[in-house]
Amino acid sequence: MNTSTLDKLRKMKFFGMFHAFKSSMETGKTNDYTADELLAHLVDAEWDDRQNRRIERTILYARFRYKASIEDVHYHADRSIDRNQIMRLADCTFVDRFENLLITGSTGIGKSYVASAIGHQACILGYRVLYTSTPKLFAKLKMAKADGSYIKEIAKLERTQLLILDDFGIQPFDAQSRAALMEIIEDRHGKTSLIITSQLPVSKWFEVIGEKTIADAILDRIVHDAHRIELKGESMRRKRSVEPENSH
């Protein structure tokens, strides 16, 4: 009877229940539970399994550059990272409020890691997240214009509750990329959130975007009331070459 039950659980894809019931049988713990307790145990196992698989799918969809976590962020005094600020951002209520986060600092300082850590936390909390390199995104959108998939790509970005634009401002925007950026920002403004990382201070973004009217409109929507993290200190990549792993 139990073998038949396990087979049915597996075929119905109740994998959490399957493994919990199988484990309880193998360890002889089924006799330790009342009927109500056993049912609650199996339901909890199924719930946890489905939640974990959902989180795995969400993280896979996000396409992070780093496997990052809030717990592994290092708060060295010379980095100018406020632990309380990071913890507040990690609860992701800024996403509920459709607010943005701007992370700036020199190359190798850990901007992408911090952004990814907050992004991972958002995935765990059930938000749809997408991480992308800014230059690669706009190169992809140019190709999408050419092959007719542009509207589909823009719609995909719009459905994302938290969009992480990494390496913003590495190269100036040309007219086509500037127009695409304006469209993305306009679509998302007041509806979803952005995390933007950049080697350039925010004061330099105007020049990188170019064309005064469009730059004003974009920055007004991005920067107004945004949370900011300005990382300082030496390159973490350089430090990791002489220190143990996992310094972020």
Image (spheres, rainbow, N blue to C red):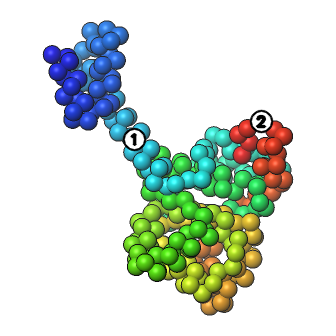
- Tag 2 secondary structure: loop
Q: Rounded to the nearest whole Å, what is the CA distance between mark 1 and mark 2?
A: 31 Å
Q: Residues within 10 Å of mark 1 (few under 14, many from 20)?
A: few
Image quadrant where residue 17 sits: top left
Which amino acid type corresponds to the residue marked 2 in the rendered image? Pro
Q: Position of residue 38 (x, y in %)?
A: 27, 20
Residue at 71% in and 71% down: 170
- Tag 1 secondary structure: helix
Give the label on residue 164, or none: none
Answer above or below: position of 172 versus 125: below
Answer above or below: position of 184 versus 214: above
Mark 1 = which residue?
53
Residue at 57% in and 73% down: 139
Can residue 158 be seen in the rendering of this structure? no
Q: Residues within 10 Å of mark 2 (few under 14, many from 20)?
A: few
Mark 2 = which residue?
244
Answer above or below: position of 155 versus 2: below
Q: Nearer the viewer, residue 82 or 78?
A: 78
Q: Tell me: 11 left or right of 41.
A: left
Q: Position of residue 80 (x, y in %)?
A: 78, 54
Q: Tell me: 59 left or right of 230.
A: left
Residue at 70% in and 66% down: 198
Answer above or below: position of 83 versus 163: above
Q: Position of residue 191 (x, y in %)?
A: 45, 70
Which amino acid type corresponds to the residue marked 1 in the rendered image? Arg
Image quadrant where residue 210 sits: bottom right
